[in-house]
Image: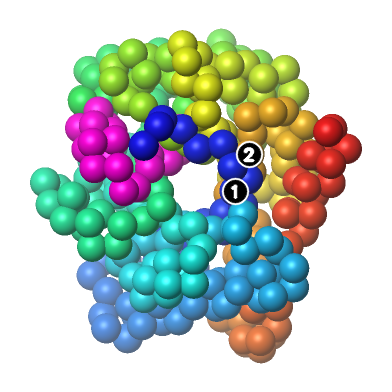
Amino acid sequence: MNLGFDQPLYILPFDHRGSFQSKMFGWSGVLTDAQTSAIVAAKSVIYEGFLAAIAAGVPAQKAGILVDEQFGSAILLDAAKRGFATACPVERSGQDEFDFEYGEDFIGHIERFKPTFCKVLVRYNPEGNADLNRRQAARLQQLSDYLHAKQESRLMFELLVPAEAAELEELHGDKQVYDRELRPRLMVRAIHELQDAGVEPDLWKIEGLDRREDCLQIVAAARRNGRDRVGCIVLGRGEDEAKVHEWLATAASVAGFIGFAVGRTTFWKPLIDWRDKKISREAAVTEVGRRFKTWVQIFEQVIGANH
């Protein structure tokens, strides 16, 4: 398997676990069987919305889902059977430090599902705790080496670069200035450091960037030193539709950004309305599908205008 993935890829991510449990339903601690079933049912609404978008014209060969084993194992298996790209998280949910969800047994879980992509969410600020960064990089290198040797699943790396307290202090606590002025440079440094530590993603999942020149710098970092096929996709960060539209259009204008992964902005409000019995299940499915199809149309319109 050559390093990298550079084909169009439109992902509907709903691998949220701890946050889904607490913020969607207000539950904490060990779930009852009934609570687990309720989360599984909610995720099936999202998946049916994805299928509705495919039926409405989203190109199946470019579309995929990202869902967790805990609540979405049946969905993973069904999507694979239908020929969609599948992605499954391997990180423990809700942790500041990356570690494997299933500890040393992570390989067995990957081999059970053989997803198109194994996804990791990693918080890594190159100006943060150096020991923490080294520990994370060592675990990530272990996963990267396994995936490239096995050649069945590719590595999807969701890079979050949270602001350090000292960085925010310098910016008078303005997170918007951090996102615009500092985070893009830190992301490039993080990508370089992780590559130098032997972590080799096929695909980088990147927080939305306001400026096209920052997208260009991210692609250059992802593809440096012969990594010519490595792709980037932009994520939505749960922002409103207008902001997601802006980020998609900016990323789509840059070769190397091959698609997106927009989750909460796609499904959160329809699911909340369904949960609160304000709309029917069918209406929630339809709205999830409509939103997902809208992101695809935005991305493809910009690509078409730039080629």
Q: In which quarter of the image is residue 286?
A: bottom right
- Which residue is located at x 40 percent, y 48 percent? 117
Asked if residue 145 lies in the magenta stretch, the reply is yes
Residue situated in front as seen by the camera: 183 or 116: 116
Q: In which quarter of the image is residue 110?
A: bottom left
Q: Which mark is residue 258?
A: 2
Find the distance from the CA under tag 1 to the CA under tag 2. 6 Å
Marks 1 and 2 close (CB-CB < 8 Å): yes
Which numbered disc flags the more N-terminal residue, 1 or 2? 1
Give the magenta range. Answer: 140-159
Three-letter amino acid code at the position of disc 1: Leu
Residue 246 lies, in percent from the top left, at: 78, 40
Tell me, yes or no, if residue 97 can be seen here: no
Residue 101 lies, in percent from the top left, at: 23, 51
Q: In which quarter of the image is the N terminus?
A: top left
Q: Which mark is residue 9?
A: 1
Three-letter amino acid code at the position of disc 2: Ile
Looking at the rendered structure, the secondary structure element under dot 2 is strand
Asked if residue 94 lies in the magenta stretch, the reply is no
